[in-house]
Amino acid sequence: MITLRCTKKLLGRLGASRAAKPGAPERLPTARLGDWHANVLYRPNAELVMFVNDRSLLPVVVPARPGELIVVRFVEALGEVLRRLGVPAEVIEGETAQMAVVQIGPTRSRQILGSMNDFDRMLDYRLASGRAFIDAALELAKAPCGPIAMRRPKDVAVELLASGE
């Protein structure tokens, strides 16, 4: 189980009725990487959704349309990103299996939103060269990030998955 912490723009797209009600008890994530923040991004020729992991800042980018497939695409893309980072198949299967139950909620970390904005600015350059979304996300994951002590999200994600925390 994870919670997707969505911006207001994305909550509207997903249907705010799916969001956890204020005051409702939050369920803790069961996935090793924990919860994710997400935002919809508008580009001249595409609408995208960027997901950023709360613990590692690992980014994942998927098409925003059709809206009912956003979460499915996210889980599939995450599996591919982790595979390309060298995470063992059984660990990927375990992580994505824990993501079968997704709770939708509002964002709660300005620090993660700031990192998402940084990634958003870097994304145009990565996509302009014709890279696929997965390749662009992997490039973003190499950028040192202040909230994780100038470490790279890809390294932190792999360590979290290897440690079993």
Image: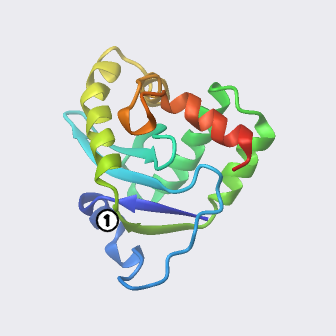
Q: Which residue is mark 1?
A: 11
Toward which corner of the image does residue 27 lie, by quadrant? bottom right
Residue sitting at the far bottom: 23
Q: Secondary structure at mark 1?
A: helix
* Residue at (27% x, 43% y) in the render: 114
Q: Is residue 136 above or below residue 18?
A: above
Q: Residue furthest right?
A: 90
Q: Position of residue 44 (x, y in %)?
A: 19, 34
Relative to 62, does residue 97 appear above or below in the rendering?
Answer: below
Give the residue type that dot 1 points to: Leu
Residue at the extreme top = 129
Q: Nearest the camera: 103 or 144? A: 144
Residue 133: x and y in percent read 43, 30
Q: How many marks?
A: 1
The residue positioned 46% from the left and 22% from the top of the image is 142
Seen from this angle, which residue lies furthest front?
149
Q: How far from the left and from the top, in percent, is residue 138? A: 49, 26
Question: Which residue is nearer to you in this view: 41 or 51?
Answer: 51
Q: Would residue 12 appear left or right of 91 to someone viewing this image?
A: left
Name the colour scheme.
Answer: rainbow
Taking the spot 71% from the left edge, 32% from the top edge, the residue there is 87
Q: Residue at x 39, y 57 (%)?
A: 67
Image coordinates of residue 25 in percent, x first then y, are: 49, 82
The vertical placement of 77 against 27, above or below, is above
* Observer-nearest of 51 and 12: 51
In the rendered view, tell whether residue 118 sits above or below residue 165: above
Q: Residues within 10 Å of mark 1 (few under 14, many from 20)?
A: many
